[in-house]
Image (tube, grey):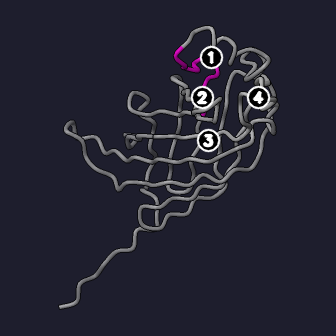
Amino acid sequence: MAVLTESRTALPTGTWILDPVHSTIGFELPYLAGTFRGSFTDVDAKLTADSLSGSARVASVDVKDENLAAHLQSPEFFDAESHPELSFASRSIERSGDELKVDGEITIRGTTKPVELVGKIADPITDAFGNERVNVRLETTVDRTAFGLNWNMPLPNGQPALKNEVTLVAELYFVREA
């Protein structure tokens, strides 16, 4: 008897809305001799069989110091007053097994640039309350100066305190829309 195997190349059908409690959108970049990390707590996203879109409120930037959070919201960085939101919209999505590649455009500080996100997608599961869920984890690296995030501080050795390459990481949990 022949066994049929299904190739998982399609996204889950229907509309999936973000579960913000379990989802994070974060960033990390080389800083001094290590890595600086932060995230946004007010995020939104939607997944369909052919699109992914999302946003994060700049005022929700979360770092371990409130003074630093205020600095990140200032005109020297994200400029939350003039540009209150970061956003992403896909142009195409390719799935091969659990691998995912999403081409789209990201807007940071009012500047929109093309970007490719890569990562993984899990098959939908049903949780203990009968809700269908799916997890998507994506990341990409962008040059922050391409979006006008130019602030830096020189170290005594002449090197900058912050590197320009920022890794954006999204751990997104979606629930099928009823």
Position above or below: 112 against 123: above
Counting other residues with Cα less than 10 Å from the Cα at mark 3, is it few (<14), some (14-19), or many (20 or more)? Answer: some
Which residue range is magenta in the image?
55-64
Label drawn at residue 56: 2
Label drawn at residue 109: 4
Whole-angstrom CA distance, mark 3 to mark 1, is: 20 Å
Query: Of callouts 2 and 3, which one flags the residue occurring earlier in the amino acid sequence?
Result: 2
Whole-angstrom CA distance, mark 1 to mark 2, is: 9 Å
Whole-angstrom CA distance, mark 4 to mark 2, is: 12 Å
Question: On the image, numbered disc 1 is attached to which residue?
Answer: 59
Disc tally is 4
Query: Mark 1: which amino acid?
Result: Ala
Secondary element at image label 1:
helix
Query: Mark 3: which amino acid?
Result: Thr
Picture quadrant of residue 155: top right
Question: On the image, numbered disc 3 is attached to which residue?
Answer: 167
Label drawn at residue 46: none
In this picture, residue 120 sits left or right of residue 108: left
Q: Are marks 3 and 4 in contact (CB under 8 Å)?
A: no
Query: Of callouts 3 and 1, which one flags the residue occurring earlier in the amino acid sequence?
Result: 1
Whole-angstrom CA distance, mark 1 to mark 4, is: 13 Å
Picture quadrant of residue 55: top right
In this picture, residue 131 sits left or right of residue 49: left
Position above or below: 122 against 26: below
Q: Residue furthest top?
A: 67
Q: Are marks 1 and 4 in contact (CB under 8 Å)?
A: no
What is the x, y in percent for residue 166?
Answer: 66, 39
Query: Mark 2: which amino acid?
Result: Ala
In this picture, residue 163 sits left or right of residue 50: right
What is the x, y in percent for residue 86?
Answer: 67, 31
